[in-house]
Image (cartoon, helix red, strand yellow):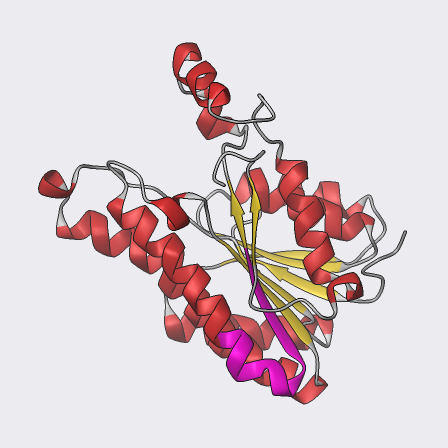
């Protein structure tokens, strides 16, 4: 359908999982793809090769998204390599779970830095480019946990809630410049991480979901494509839950 033909999308943490699915879907709709990874170069190069078969320009970049100055330098390099940045997807994220009374300061700081500060870093660096273009779409990958909290994930929940508030604030600040910002809140999505859970735990999760199944990474990618495209030209400051009705 070429919904994103000619656009340049920057996706953080896209060597696997949801980020990879978003990158592949964007590329299938004609977008050129710049994406980041932290440590796994082999996965990143495999993803880069897979995207290249779709006939778009693609390049992966090693990046510590939590580093402010490194992020600014990277965004300038991507701008030089691709000419523009039309879509930013803040997808980079980790978990370091633990009950509040047992959670270390390092666990808290690491998750907040990677999940939330990284989004600030990239938005701060990308917004001037989008302002000069008078258009842009920013998508923060949050979670239903950011809406409802979760036992043992206070750091993760706080970071994901922060991504929602960040998107809403940016939407208000940058709307007059033609820049939209939204958040996606996935629920139980079947990934390598969730497949490692015991079968009984996964089945119990599914019982809580009205659609009675886990989501696919492609389900999230479809919504991201809508938010990146001109189909959502009048959608900003919103949170779209992709959770099968789990969190109503």
Q: Is residue 46 magenta?
A: no
Tell which of 148 and 191 is nearer to you.
Answer: 148
Tell which of 238 and 3 is nearer to you.
Answer: 238
Residue at x 57%, y 82% (from the top left corner): 174
Q: Using the image, determine if residue 245 lies above or below residue 90.
A: above
Taking the image as drawn, is residue 48 in sight? no
Residue at x 62%, y 87% (from the top left corner): 176
Specify whether 174 is left or right of 101.
Answer: right
Residue 81, horizontal then vertical, whole percent: 69, 71
Question: Which residue is farthest front?
Answer: 248
Q: Using the image, determine if residue 95 lies above or below residue 206.
A: below
Q: Is residue 175 magenta?
A: yes
Residue 45, horizontal then vertical, whole percent: 62, 44
| Quadrant housing residue 222 | top right
Specify whether 75 is left or right of 30.
Answer: left
Tell which of 92 and 242 is nearer to you.
Answer: 242
Query: Which stretch did the figure color magenta?
Result: 170-183
Question: Which residue is farthest right?
Answer: 1
Specify whether 165 is left or right of 173.
Answer: left
Count of marks, rendered view = 0
Residue 26, horizontal then vertical, whole percent: 74, 52
Taking the image as drawn, is residue 180 in sight? yes
Residue at x 56%, y 35% (from the top left corner): 245
Question: Which residue is farthest left?
Answer: 101
Q: Using the image, determine if residue 59 lies above or below residue 145.
A: below
Residue 57, horizontal then vertical, whole percent: 77, 58
């Amino acid at each position: 359908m070429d919904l994103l033909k000619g656009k340049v999308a920057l996706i953080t943490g896209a060597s696997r999982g949801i980020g990879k699915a978003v990158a592949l879907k964007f590329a299938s709709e004609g977008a050129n793809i710049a994406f980041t990874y932290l440590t796994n170069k082999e996965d990143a190069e495999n993803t880069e090769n897979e995207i290249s078969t779709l006939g778009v320009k693609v390049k992966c970049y090693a990046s510590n998204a939590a580093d402010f100055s490194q992020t600014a330098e990277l965004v300038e390099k991507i701008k030089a390599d691709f000419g523009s940045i039309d879509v930013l997807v803040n997808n980079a994220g980790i978990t370091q779970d633990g009950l509040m009374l047992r959670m270390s300061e390092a666990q808290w700081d690491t998750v907040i830095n990677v999940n939330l500060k990284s989004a600030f870093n990239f938005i701060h660096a990308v917004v001037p480019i989008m302002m000069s273009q008078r258009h842009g779409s920013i998508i923060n990958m949050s979670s239903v946990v950011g809406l409802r909290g979760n036992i043992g994930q206070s750091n993760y929940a706080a970071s994901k809630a922060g991504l929602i508030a960040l998107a809403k604030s940016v939407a208000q600040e940058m709307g007059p410049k033609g820049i939209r910002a939204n958040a996606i809140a996935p629920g139980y999505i079947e990934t390598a991480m969730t497949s490692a859970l015991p079968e009984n735990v996964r089945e119990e999760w599914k019982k809580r979901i009205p659609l009675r199944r886990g989501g696919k990474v492609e389900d999230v990618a479809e919504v991201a494509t809508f938010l990146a495209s001109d189909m959502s030209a009048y959608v900003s400051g919103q949170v779209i839950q992709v959770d099968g009705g789990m969190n109503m």
